[in-house]
Each structure stands twice: as structure tokens, then as C-alpha cells.
Image: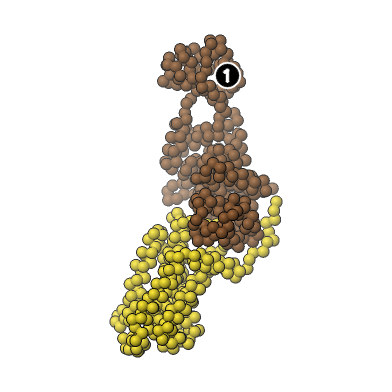
């Protein structure tokens, strides 16, 4: 009989790194996910750059230039795509294909799998934001200076939207329906949160202030354009949504395509 | 040495339907054990309880000394077992080598990545993307994922469904060589020849219950069962002309027409055959289409899982029962 004990497990961090590496490989080789995560926001910011680069500071953009406003909002929407949309679609597809069940059959702990996905999504988000800031720079938008506040907003925002993505993947059964459900929730929310057009209505602002997208825009806008640093109240709202998404995910997530 | 698997009184319901009711069996270390049964008999549910995918409603289960329903020891158990599930599920954008290497990283003492690739017959395909593999090759890759952790116990859920005959022969060879190197294997199948080719012992499931278990030689009283003798009723003969023991074997539609098939089960085939051929030779008759068959595992299986089986419990999975009945009907001659 072969020995069954005594072999050391990999350290948690080594296992996490292993997992992130293969998530990255899968992601970068999938032309669809790369396209929607990178090409779309880069095209939008380039388009806005071409359209608005002459529009200076105005009260319409809350005292910012048009592009100072759009670089953080488009950066935020790219993080939504990389975290929320990607995870909801990828996880429901993997569940339907039985890939999640196959993962569950291995000794890989569930928390390592999800932490690996989060780290992967943060890496993709960082690349996304760098691209958008780069395009903004080409159109004369000054580089942000408060990187610590940007990093905190990015990590918290990514975690929040990953949790919400997993929550949505937990609530939908059918992988074919996933993209539609994701967009149905996201598009109106992004629109009224001022991502593509500044919203001046007090009523809408009050509503979107407690939904996750506008606080994320604000948390990025401060350190990106207004040099105000940490926006604690916005970060607090993100944290609350992240916790809510996490709770739904923990309670409702299923690995098995057929589990009732 | 302790058994690899001990199951007793296992029960599981979905909604109001009892999928598994009181299943008990043991699998010894280093043994190939097959769970046989029609679709819906409870094979996969039983397997999934033992794999830790499903909870159980009742009964005891011990897998390698651990309780598969205990989440605290789940990781420790999964480090020691390998699984090949019914559906092929592999990431499309990784290569063959990357897929195996990724899963190798999950185990404390995996087999060599190249060794496993060679073992499942994918040498030369290491750099092929999974999405470009044929269905049969994906299945081999899936088997490789079950082996990479160097499991003590391997679960195979209908491992060769959809294989062509050559691929099936290869897979059987691999399963036998794994057993010979000390791996315990629990497999489910509805192919009789697969159980016949591989299993040291089998349990037949029907309607969520074990209706028979044992070695292939004696399952379901197979050793004591009767031999089938079949022949065409010679031209010009009627049932009354036959030796007395063969007369009941003439089918209900048999009359004086030539060519009616007589099928009769006998417990002393040597004597019966001697009497039959003597009878024919004495009369100058020829016995066309004469066959003598021991009871096949399939006959035993169909008898056990078909409508005439002794345990008359209410059918909860009508689909599976009906399929078994139809197949049984096609073969009934006696």
C-alpha cells in the first residue's frame, strides 16, 4: 500500500498564485472576454476624447473638464465589466458546463478558488484602468496623484462587484440568460449613475447614492480629478454592497448544474 | 485490512421521490466494484453521496476511513480520491498539458504530468487546446484529471459511455492496470460487458435498492441457474413428439409448421443434450439453429431489474423500469 500521509500541502499563497496564473491563461486566450473587457471601454474613452477634448471646466461636469469627468467614470465601468459582468457570465457558464463541479471534486478549497478569481479580476481591472488613464493622457488629461486612494477604491470596488457578480451567478440557473440578466441590471444603473452623462437631478442622485455604481464613480473621481483623496462615505456604501453580495453568494452559490 | 468503502442503509430522497433506499455494500481495497442498474436506479446518487457531492438522508457511509458527508474532512478526502464524472467538463482555452498541470497543483503528491498524459493516451497532444480536441480525447483528458492526484480510490461514473470499441478496450486496459497497481475502483455502468470485463464484484441496483450483489460468477444465483437450449422444431414434428422435458419449451404459437424455435431451460445440460441429440439421430432429424448458452450476466441483470423480479416495491422511477421491461421483453423466450 502506498503512503497516504506525510506529504506536505502547498502553502495557501502558493496555491492562490497557482490558481491566479491559470485563470489568467484562460482569460487572455478567450477572445470574447478580452474583447468586451478591454476593447469596449477603450473605444468609448477614445471616442469621448475625440468628441470632448476641447470642453473645458464647466458646471455641467461639476467643475471638471469633460475628460476629467469621463476618465474616472469609464475606468469605473471597465471595472464593472471586468468584475461583475465577467464573473456572473463566466461562473454561470462554468457551472452549466460542469466545470465548477469538476473543480469541486478536487481538493482545491472553495475560498482559494474565489480569492483566485478576485485576484484575477483585480489584475484585469488594473490593466483596464491603466489603458484608460493612458488614453486620457493622450487627450491632455493630467495623471492622477493620489494613488493610494485610487488603489483602495479599486480593490474595494473590485471586491464589491466580484461579490455581486457571484451573487447574480448564484441566482440565475441558465447560462444563456446570464448576459441578458447582467446587462438588464447594469445598463440602466450605469446610465442613471452618471457614467455616460452627468446627472444633476437631486432625486436621482439620492437614489443612485445608495446603489453601488455612483459611489464607485465618486470614489474614483475624487482621487482622479479633484485631488480629494479617500471618499469614505462612498467606500462605505461599496463595502455594504460587497457584504450583501457576499452573503447571497455564500448562501446560494451552487457548484452542481443539476442541484436543486 | 479495512474496506475502502463501507455503506449501510444509505437513503436519499428528492422531493417525495426516494432515489436511494437502504443501499448497503462494501468495497475492499484494491478491488474493482461495479454498480449496475438501469437509468434512474440510484447509481449516480449513491456515487455522489460517497464522493461528498450530496448529503444523505439516512444510513452510514465510510470512504477511506472518513465520512464523505463531513465538510471538515472534505479536503483530506478529496486529496485521496479521484473522480471521473459523467459529463466531460474541461476549460476550453487551456492546453492538454496546462489542464493536467493545473489540477496537479491541487494535490499534495500528484503523479507526473507527462506520465498521466501518456497513461491516458494523449502523448503528442500536450500543446493542443482543449477546445480543439475530439469528444473521445476530451474524455481521456477528463480521465487524466481523475488520475493526476494519484488517488487511492477512483470513482468512475459510466466511464466509457460514447466510446468506440477500440477506445473502450483501451480504457478497460487502463482501469485494470490501475487496479493492479493498488488503486481501488468503484464504477457505475449499464453495459453488462463492461462489468463482465472489469469488475471483481458487482451490486445490481433497481429502484434505489440493491437487488443482488456478489462476484460475477455467482451473482443472482447465476452459478445455480439453468442453461438455455434452443433449436428449431424439426419439419413434421409437433410438441408431443419431443422428449418430455423439452415439450414446455415449444412456444404458444408453435404448431406443425417447421422452423418454430424451441427454447428450454435445463439444470442438467449434459444429460439433456445427450437425450435431445439421440432423439433426433434415432429419427434421422436435423436440429437446425441449435444453441446451448450458459445464463449470461445480462440475463441475470434483466431478470433482477425487470418486471418479474422478486422484490415487488412500487416503481418510483417509471422511466427506468419501463426501459428494463422493454429489453427484457425482447429476449423472453421461455
Q: Can residue B246 be seen in this view?
A: yes
Q: Say which colour chain B has.
A: brown
Q: Which quarter shows the C terminus of chain A? A: bottom left
Establish if B325 lies above or below A188. Answer: above
**Residue denoted by label 1:** B272
Q: In this view, does A190 lie to the left or right of A252?
A: left
> Which residue appears at 54% of the width and 41% of the height?
B165
- Observer-nearest residue: A157 or A176? A176
User: To which quarter of the image does residue A8 belong?
Assistant: bottom right
Q: Where is residue B137 in the image (x, y as percent from the top left)?
A: 53, 51
Establish if B181 lies above or below B113. Answer: above
- Observer-nearest residue: B79 or B290? B290
As drawn, which residue projects farthest toward the top? B283
Q: Residues within 10 Å of mark 1 (few under 14, many from 20)?
A: some
Q: Say which colour chain A has.
A: yellow
> Which residue appears at 59% of the width and 61% of the height?
B101
> Which residue appears at 41% of the width and 65% of the height?
A168
Q: Can residue B50 be seen in this view?
A: no
Q: Where is residue B104 in the image (x, y as percent from the top left)?
A: 60, 60
- Observer-nearest residue: A249 or B229? B229
The coloring applied to the image is: by chain
Q: Position of residue A204 (x, y in %)?
A: 31, 79
Q: Mark 1 lies on which chain?
A: B
Amino acid at each position: 500500500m502506498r503512503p497516504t500521509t506525510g506529504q506536505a500541502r502547498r502553502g495557501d499563497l502558493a496555491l492562490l498564485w497557482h490558481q491566479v496564473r491559470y485563470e489568467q491563461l484562460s482569460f487572455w486566450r478567450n477572445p470574447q472576454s478580452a474583447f468586451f473587457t478591454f476593447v469596449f471601454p477603450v473605444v468609448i474613452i477614445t471616442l469621448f476624447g475625440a468628441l470632448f477634448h476641447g470642453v473645458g471646466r464647466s458646471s455641467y461636469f461639476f467643475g471638471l473638464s469633460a475628460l476629467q469627468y469621463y476618465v474616472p467614470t469609464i475606468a469605473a465601468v471597465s471595472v464593472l465589466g471586468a468584475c461583475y459582468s465577467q464573473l456572473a457570465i463566466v461562473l454561470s457558464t462554468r457551472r452549466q458546463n460542469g466545470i465548477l463541479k469538476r473543480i469541486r471534486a478536487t481538493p482545491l478549497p472553495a475560498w482559494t478558488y474565489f480569492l483566485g478569481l478576485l485576484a484575477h479580476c483585480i489584475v484585469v481591472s488594473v490593466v483596464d484602468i491603466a489603458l484608460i488613464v493612458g488614453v486620457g493622457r493622450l487627450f491632455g488629461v493630467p495623471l492622477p496623484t493620489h494613488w493610494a486612494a485610487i488603489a483602495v477604491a479599486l480593490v474595494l470596488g473590485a471586491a464589491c462587484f466580484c461579490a455581486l457578480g457571484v451573487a447574480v451567478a448564484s441566482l440565475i440557473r441558465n447560462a444563456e440568460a446570464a448576459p441578458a440578466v447582467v446587462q438588464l441590471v447594469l445598463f440602466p444603473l450605469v446610465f442613471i449613475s452618471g457614467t455616460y452623462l452627468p446627472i444633476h437631478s437631486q432625486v436621482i442622485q439620492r437614489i443612485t447614492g445608495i446603489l453601488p455604481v455612483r459611489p464607485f464613480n465618486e470614489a474614483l473621481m475624487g482621487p482622479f480629478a479633484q485631488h480629494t483623496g479617500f471618499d469614505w462615505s462612498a467606500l462605505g456604501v461599496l463595502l455594504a454592497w460587497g457584504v450583501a453580495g457576499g452573503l447571497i453568494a455564500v448562501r446560494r452559490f451552487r457548484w452542481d448544474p443539476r442541484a436543486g | 485490512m479495512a474496506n475502502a468503502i463501507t455503506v449501510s442503509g444509505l437513503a436519499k430522497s428528492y422531493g417525495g421521490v426516494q432515489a436511494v433506499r437502504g443501499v448497503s455494500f462494501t468495497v475492499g481495497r484494491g478491488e474493482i466494484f461495479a454498480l449496475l442498474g438501469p437509468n434512474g436506479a440510484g447509481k449516480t446518487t449513491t456515487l455522489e453521496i460517497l464522493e461528498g457531492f450530496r448529503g444523505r438522508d439516512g444510513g452510514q457511509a465510510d470512504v477511506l476511513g472518513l465520512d464523505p458527508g463531513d465538510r471538515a474532512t472534505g479536503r483530506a478526502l478529496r486529496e485521496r480520491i479521484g473522480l471521473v464524472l459523467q459529463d466531460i467538463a474541461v476549460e476550453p482555452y487551456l492546453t492538454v498539458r496546462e489542464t493536467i498541470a493545473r489540477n496537479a497543483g491541487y494535490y499534495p503528491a500528484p503523479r507526473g504530468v507527462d506520465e498521466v498524459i501518456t497513461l491516458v493516451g494523449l502523448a503528442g497532444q500536450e500543446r493542443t487546446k482543449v477546445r480543439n480536441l475530439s469528444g473521445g480525447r476530451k474524455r481521456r483528458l477528463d480521465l487524466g484529471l481523475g488520475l493526476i492526484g494519484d488517488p487511492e480510490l477512483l470513482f468512475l461514473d459510466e466511464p466509457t459511455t460514447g466510446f468506440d470499441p477500440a477506445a473502450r478496450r483501451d480504457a478497460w486496459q487502463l482501469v485494470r492496470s490501475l487496479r493492479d497497481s493498488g488503486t481501488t475502483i468503484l464504477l457505475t455502468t449499464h453495459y453488462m460487458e463492461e462489468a463482465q470485463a472489469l469488475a471483481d464484484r458487482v451490486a445490481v441496483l433497481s429502484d434505489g435498492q440493491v437487488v443482488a450483489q456478489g462476484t460475477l460468477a455467482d451473482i443472482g444465483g447465476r452459478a445455480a441457474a439453468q442453461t438455455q437450449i434452443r433449436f428449431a422444431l424439426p419439419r413434421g414434428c409437433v410438441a408431443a413428439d419431443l422428449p418430455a422435458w423439452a415439450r414446455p419449451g415449444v412456444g404458444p404459437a408453435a404448431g406443425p409448421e417447421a422452423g418454430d424455435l424451441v427454447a428450454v431451460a435445463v439444470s442438467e445440460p449434459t444429460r439433456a443434450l445427450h437425450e435431445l441429440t439421440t432423439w433426433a439421430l434415432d429419427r434421422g432429424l436435423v436440429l437446425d439453429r441449435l444453441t446451448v448458452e450458459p445464463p449470461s450476466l445480462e440475463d441475470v441483470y434483466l431478470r433482477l431489474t425487470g418486471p418479474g423480479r422478486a422484490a415487488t416495491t412500487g416503481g418510483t422511477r417509471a422511466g427506468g423500469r419501463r426501459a428494463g421491461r422493454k429489453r427484457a421483453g425482447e429476449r423472453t423466450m421461455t
